[in-house]
Image (cartoon, helix red, strand yellow):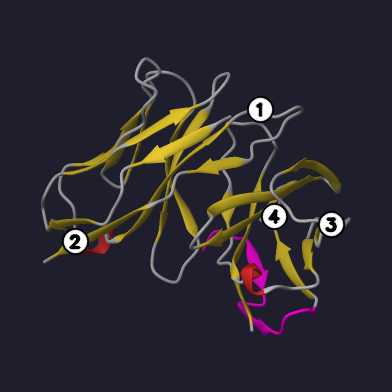
Amino acid sequence: DSGVTQTPKHLITATGQRVTLRCSPRSGDLSVYWYQQSLDQGLQFLIQYYNGEERAKGNILERFSAQQFPDLHSELNLSSLELGDSALYFCASSVEGAASYEQYFGPGTRLTVT
Amino acid sequence: GNSVTQMEGPVTLSEEAFLTINCTYTATGYPSLFWYVQYPGEGLQLLLKATKADDKGSNKGFEATYRKETTSFHLEKGSVQVSDSAVYFCALSTPYGGATNKLIFGTGTLLAVQP
């Protein structure tokens, strides 16, 4: 158990809908990262927050957005869903944002868009 | 840009065999290097890391040495067990603007160990 929690574990929804994925980092961790794992794209970095502020952006679609709240939990919002958004979405956390700090991953949310 | 290249899988071995999974990287600056493992149906777990050239990361019998001259970070284990069956990901992180360490992953290598 990494100490990072994600809800829900599974999500099935239809095209065009909007969903929210939630992540709670390990106690004491200030950085939260979101990654997408799909068969065709592999594991890709989406976005990072550090202590409530956006720190870095990866290949995140404009239909996707995220935020980190004062209690440090984070939410990833996916809207106007398409079939190609079906994937595993992982949240990770680390103590700081520096390159040498390892990231601890949650169990993931499996999103299926039908 | 920064990237990680891993050997294609699957890798199928008998129990107690020697394991090598090759990983090479391209990066500007001085990256930190990681191996993560993903067991079926689970998230990623950090297996080991190295933060500078010639560092050796080790954990649970697995080892990898940061080789700057060959830009490699190959994963090795002397004697694999059935319980080591999983997908192994090589990854790197580099400073990006301020203090951030987004991970760039390889494609993953599936290891299947047979009794």
The residue wearing badge 4 is A27
The residue wearing badge 2 is B113
The answer to whether residue B15 is above or below residue A107 is above
Dot 2 falls on a residue whose secondary structure is strand
Q: Residue at x 46, y 37 (%)?
A: B4
Residue B95 numbered mark, or none:
1
Residue type pointed to by label 1: Pro
Dot 1 falls on a residue whose secondary structure is loop
What is the x, y in percent for residue B43?
Answer: 50, 62
Q: Residues within 10 Å of mark 2 (few under 14, many from 20)?
A: some
Chain ID, mark 3? A
Range of the magenta residues?
A: A1-17
The quadrant of the image that shows the N terminus of chain B is top right
CA gap, disc 1 to disc 2?
A: 36 Å
The residue wearing badge 3 is A67
Q: Residue at x 71, y 84 (%)?
A: A14
CA gap, disc 3 to disc 2?
A: 41 Å
Residue B61 quadrant: top left
Chain ID, mark 4? A
Query: In this orientation, which residue lies closer to the viewer: A72 or A43?
Result: A43
